[in-house]
């Protein structure tokens, strides 16, 4: 099943000069792989789309299992990975361009949160907007 929000992010990133590969069916830990053609650096991206302002990884057993697999691989292998969350139906985002509705967290940021399962809040000061994410190293 094609997720329009994944394709939306793919298009936004490609418009900013990145090479983006989509993992069909999200069979691995990442939905997208973004490659910077200038530096040859890559970033794995796990995409989520929600209707409210907070995303709880604890919502489903599938999300919990996926989080633990991602966390362990990032710690063990030093992989550069982010969670990209698209917020929809938020009053604060009405009338905004699609790229303004995305927020990004590194897996390392989420590991540092208190508790076992992280929470991603639209209003979190640590959340990166698109431009900050594109300049993140």
Image (cartoon, rainbow, N blue to C red):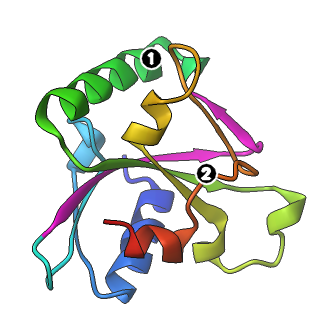
Q: Are marks 2 and 1 in contact (CB under 8 Å)?
A: no
Quadrant of the rendered image containing residue 111 = top left
Q: Residue at x 55, y 28 (%)?
A: 113
Residue identified by numbered label 2: 126
Along the line of sight, which residue is nearer the eye, 135 or 22? 135
Along the line of sight, which residue is nearer the eye, 10 or 125? 125
Residue identified by numbered label 1: 64
Q: Is residue 43 magenta?
A: yes
Quadrant of the rendered image containing residue 18 = bottom left
Kindly report which numbered mark, 2 or 1, lies closer to the viewer in this rendering. Answer: 2
Q: Does dot 2 land on a helix, a strand or a loop? A: loop
Q: Does dot 1 land on a helix, a strand or a loop? A: helix
Measured from the top left, where is residue 46 in percent x and y?
37, 45
Residue projecting furthest to the right: 91
- The range drawn in magenta is 41-56
Measured from the top left, where is residue 83 in percent x and y?
44, 46
Q: Residue at x 30, y 48 (%)?
A: 81
Measured from the top left, where is residue 69 in percent x and y?
27, 22
Would residue 96 appear left or right of 37 to someone viewing this image?
A: right
Q: Around disc 2, counting alpha carbons within 10 Å, would you say few (fewer than 14), some (14 to 19), or many (20 or more)?
A: some
- Number of residue marks: 2
Q: Residue at x 17, y 40 (%)?
A: 78
Along the line of sight, which residue is nearer the eye, 70 or 24? 70
Reply above or below: 133 against 28.
Answer: below
């Amino acid at each position: 099943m094609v997720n329009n929000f994944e394709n939306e992010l793919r298009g936004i990133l490609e418009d900013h000069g990145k090479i983006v590969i989509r993992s069909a069916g999200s069979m691995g830990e990442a939905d997208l792989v973004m490659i910077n053609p200038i530096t040859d650096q890559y970033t794995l991206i796990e995409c989520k789309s929600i209707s409210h302002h907070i995303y709880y990884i604890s919502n489903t057993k599938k999300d919990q299992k996926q989080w633990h697999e991602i966390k362990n691989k990032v710690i063990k292998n030093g992989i550069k990975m982010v969670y990209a969350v698209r917020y929809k139906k938020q009053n604060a985002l009405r009338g905004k361009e699609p790229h303004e509705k995305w927020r990004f967290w590194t897996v390392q940021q989420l590991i540092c949160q208190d508790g076992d399962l992280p929470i991603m809040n639209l209003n979190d000061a640590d959340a990166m907007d698109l431009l900050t994410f594109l300049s993140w190293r």
